[in-house]
Amino acid sequence: MKQTSERQGFAWFVIAVVLLSTSTASYTFIVLLLPVVLLLQESGPRRSIFLVVSYVLATLPLHPAWLFPKLWLLFALFIAAGCPHWQEISRRLVLAAMIASALIAVVDARRHILSYEGEPGQHFARVAAQEGAAFSSFPTISKAGLFYQSMGKDRYVLRWLHDNRDDELSFEGHALHPPTRTRWRIDLLRIGGQSDLDGDAV
């Protein structure tokens, strides 16, 4: 009985960690495989079906994304994994924890909203938008246009915004750190070392 409790307790803990994580990538849910397997060893037919279906759905791209379906699936898994432990926890303790969590969430949400209102995107017009980009940063303005670092298909690249065009500048390695206003210097990261491209700005 003690071994069973320890297995379910560990599985419950891992699911809670994933639930609190900010990552929603598909590979993140491989972490759930171990707790699901541990729970399946001590589950009946109905609970086993629920665990398997929930795990498979959590690894798939679910829509609509604005409803956070994976979050609700993880929450359901958390509740199901904790069923054997709920009776051991005082109701007053659970209620107090829920109230404290709600208050902390409200305070933290208000802080983030105030911070968001002060961000540049709320006060300045958007210069460019790259569709499907996972990362774009380090903008630098020069006479030739706007350069910025971005993530390409298989490496970091430089993007060059000029004349209503947004061109990709790809190199043999990862292109990091766009040019400055007077000089351009690009750090190229290759397998086995790092090198620089240096020259006069256009």
Image (tube, rainbow, N blue to C red):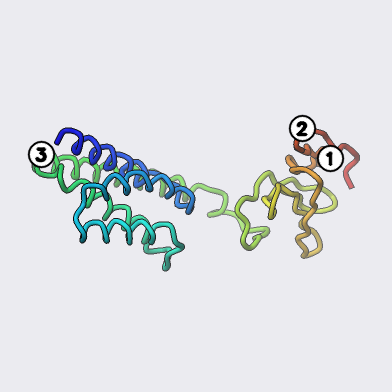
- First in sequence, mark 1 or 3: give its number: 3
Q: Residues within 10 Å of mark 1 (few under 14, many from 20)?
A: some
Viewer-side residue, 94 vs 6: 6
Q: Are marks 1 and 2 in contact (CB under 8 Å)?
A: no
Say what amino acid the circle numbered 2 marks: Gly
Q: Which mark is residue 184?
A: 1
Q: Secondary structure at mark 1?
A: strand
Disc 3 target residue: 88
- First in sequence, mark 3 or 2: give its number: 3
Q: Which mark is residue 173?
A: none
The residues bearing labels 1 and 3 have C-alpha atoms spaced at a distance of 64 Å
Disc 2 target residue: 192
Horizontal side of residue 190 vs 93, given as left or right = right
> How many numbered callouts?
3
Q: Are marks 3 and 2 in contact (CB under 8 Å)?
A: no
Could you tell me residue 164's position as x and y percent? Answer: 77, 65
The residues bearing labels 3 and 2 have C-alpha atoms spaced at a distance of 56 Å
* Residue at the image position 23 percent from the left and 48 percent from the top: 81
Viewer-side residue, 73 vs 151: 73
Q: Nearer the viewer, mark 1 or mark 3?
A: 3
- First in sequence, mark 1 or 2: give its number: 1
Could you tell me residue 53's position as x and y percent? Answer: 33, 61
Q: Secondary structure at mark 3?
A: loop
Q: Report if residue 176 is visible in the image.
A: yes
Which quadrant of the figure contains the N terminus? top left
**Residue 47 falls in which quadrant of the image?**
bottom left
Q: Residues within 10 Å of mark 3 (few under 14, many from 20)?
A: few
* Residue at the image position 90 percent from the left and 39 percent from the top: 199
Could you tell me residue 33's position as x and y percent? Answer: 38, 48
Say what amino acid the circle numbered 3 marks: Glu
